[in-house]
Amino acid sequence: MTTPRRFTGDTLVIASHNKGKVREIADLLGPYVATFTSAGDLGLPEPEETGTSFVANAELKALAAAGAGHVALADDSGLVVPALNGDPGIYSARWAGPSKDFAMAMRKVEDGLGANADRSAYFVCALSLAWPDGHVETVEGRCYGTLVWPPRGEQGFGYDPMFKPDGHGITFGEMDPAKKHEMSHRADAFRQLVERCFK
Ligand SMILES: O=c1nc[nH]c2c1ncn2[C@H]1C[C@H](O)[C@@H](COP(=O)(O)OP(=O)(O)OP(=O)(O)O)O1
Ligand SMILES: [Mg+2]
């Protein structure tokens, strides 16, 4: 195995156009990075997510942003529902349509489940850190839970109101963000990335 490359700069580009994610990433990496900017702030285009895995899409988004000349971090994430053969999976954002209607996307998940007894689900988060020379470091985190209906809570974003992490009685939508950051798929991935590239 080759030695991982460490992040040594002071500005990190968060290669995401999702404000909920940008906020969580800045929270989680705050202690290790002096200044954040985002792909949105820099006016970078949103690349088409043509990959067939979370890892492939995270790498494609990070490399696209790093092409502008700064180290960039991308997150590709989603909700995997085994009873729906893994859907919405890498299509989690696309299920919400161009207006990012997650009330509709959650209803689509619920309709798909119908009377299915298996309401287990997990979130996946692939993180990719890319340098302008094309080097990438990638990790993947997970968080297991159960889907509830109706959705509950106003915190977080995306599918959070219908996801109850294992071992807890409330959904991510009802949970204090600091608490979500202790157990989420993104937290799991960041623990690995911080260990590898930010320490
Ligand atoms: O913690 C989460 N809590 C709830 N829902 C979540 C979470 N993490 C990902 N998700 C869902 C919603 C999101 O829209 C999609 C990711 O899709 P994904 O393509 O990675 O992100 P995106 O298109 O929203 O922004 P961008 O690609 O610019 O980073 O999965
Ligand atoms: Mg996306």
Image: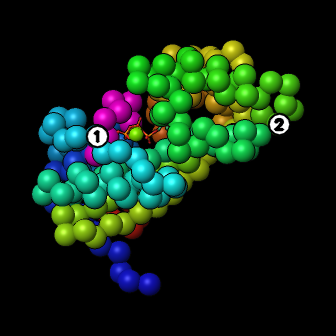
Q: Residue at x 57, y 18 (%)?
A: 104
Q: Which mark is residue 46?
A: 1
Residue 85 higher or lower than 148, as above or below = below
The alpha-carbon separation of the residues under discs 2 and 1 comes to 35 Å
Task: Identify the mark at residue 72; answer none if there is no mark.
Answer: none
Q: Quadrant of residue 64?
A: bottom left
Query: Which residue corresponds to the image point at 38% horizontal and 30% vertical from the top-left?
Result: 20
Task: Name the kind of residue labelled 2 in the image.
Answer: Asp
* Label 1 neighbour load within 10 Å: few <14, some 14-19, many 20+: some
Q: Nearer the viewer, mark 2 or mark 1?
A: 1
Residue 22 is situated, as x and y percent measured from the top left of the image, at 33, 37
For the residue pair 61 and 128, the one nearer the viewer reads as 61
Q: Is residue 26 visible?
A: no
- The residue range painted magenta reads 15-21
First in sequence: mark 2 or mark 1? 1
Q: Is mark 1 within 8 Å of ligand 1?
A: yes
| Numbered mark located on residue 118 in the image | 2
Where disc 1 sits, the SS reads loop
Please rate how many residues cluster around mark 2, counting C-alpha atoms within 10 Å: few if below 14, some from 14 to 19, many from 20: few
Q: Quadrant of residue 175?
A: top right
